[in-house]
Image (cartoon, rainbow, N blue to C red):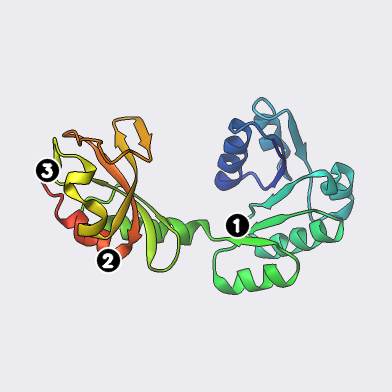
Amino acid sequence: MKSILVVGMGTLGRCLAQKMQELGNDVMIIDKDEDLIQELSSVFDDAVAGDCTNPDVLKSIGVNNFDICFVAIGENFYSSLEITSLLKELGAAYVVSKAKQARQADFLKKIGADEVFFPEREIAEKLAIRYNATNIFDYIELTSDCSIFEIPIIPEWVGKSIIEINVRQKYNVNIIAIKSGQSIDPLPGGDYRFQNDDHIVVIGKSKDVFELSAKTIR
């Protein structure tokens, strides 16, 4: 369990804070909108109304006691810069800040952000990959040319085992899980026999997975 601070209760901040709380972490949220904080106080035990560009506000909550501080402000980049800088000055252990473009990320890193994320860009890239190729259900980029994909199986695989199909040698991908409905079988053995509605979660070079996914059209 980690101690988490989320600054900024826009859509991103709320979703991030809720998920962190669902995962069993101690979460404090803060936003300058008092009405919004009052509304969210029924969901979060630690909900604080305050302007985080004011050093006294951040000092009062003891930012050095959190494992991670997220700055999820998107509309006012100057405020994001100021809050990121103040968090590091006040001893925050690890600060993760939101950016919309590379230039913003450069500034955030220069004034102390330990990590910068681009939610809009990441979503756009994920959608582009998913809908550019055939039958891509999910996608996680690992490097520029290697990713994890969820795709359906080729119809001819039904009833055959992983060993029989020789997936790794024939298609240059590794199967890391089998997904059937809502259940997932991680690291299936070579004797696993495919069923009609199975999806496979594979790791490999994107070009190889795209070629494989094109063969899955039913």
207 sits to left or right of 21: left
- Identify which residue is drawn at 81% across, 60% down: 88
Q: Quadrant of residue 113?
A: bottom right
154 sits to left or right of 18: left
Mark 2, secondary structure of its residue: helix
Q: Is residue 132 visible?
A: no
Mark 3, secondary structure of its residue: helix
86 sits to left or right of 9: right
Please name whichever residue, 197 or 8, is drawn nearer the observer in this view of the structure: 197
Q: Earlier in the sequence, mark 1 or mark 3?
A: 1
* Residue behind mark 2: 207
User: As shown in the figure, which amino acid type bears the numbered disc 1?
Assistant: Gly
Coordinates of residue 47 in the picture (x, y in percent): 74, 34
* Residue behind mark 1: 74
Mark 1 and mark 3: Cα distance apart in space: 45 Å
Q: Is residue 210 visible?
A: yes
Q: Nearer the viewer, mark 1 or mark 3?
A: 3
* Residue behind mark 3: 155
Q: Earlier in the sequence, mark 2 or mark 1?
A: 1
Coordinates of residue 50 in the picture (x, y in percent): 79, 44
Mark 1, secondary structure of its residue: loop
User: As shown in the figure, which amino acid type bears the numbered disc 2?
Assistant: Lys
Image quadrant holding the C terminus, namely top left
User: As shown in the figure, which amino acid type bears the numbered disc 3?
Assistant: Pro
Mark 3 and mark 2: Cα distance apart in space: 21 Å
- Identify which residue is drawn at 29% across, 30% down: 181
Category of crowding for the residue at label 1, using alpha-carbon neighbours closer than 10 angstroms: few (below 14), some (14–19), many (at least 20): some
Figure disc tally: 3
Q: Is residue 215 above or below residue 178?
A: below
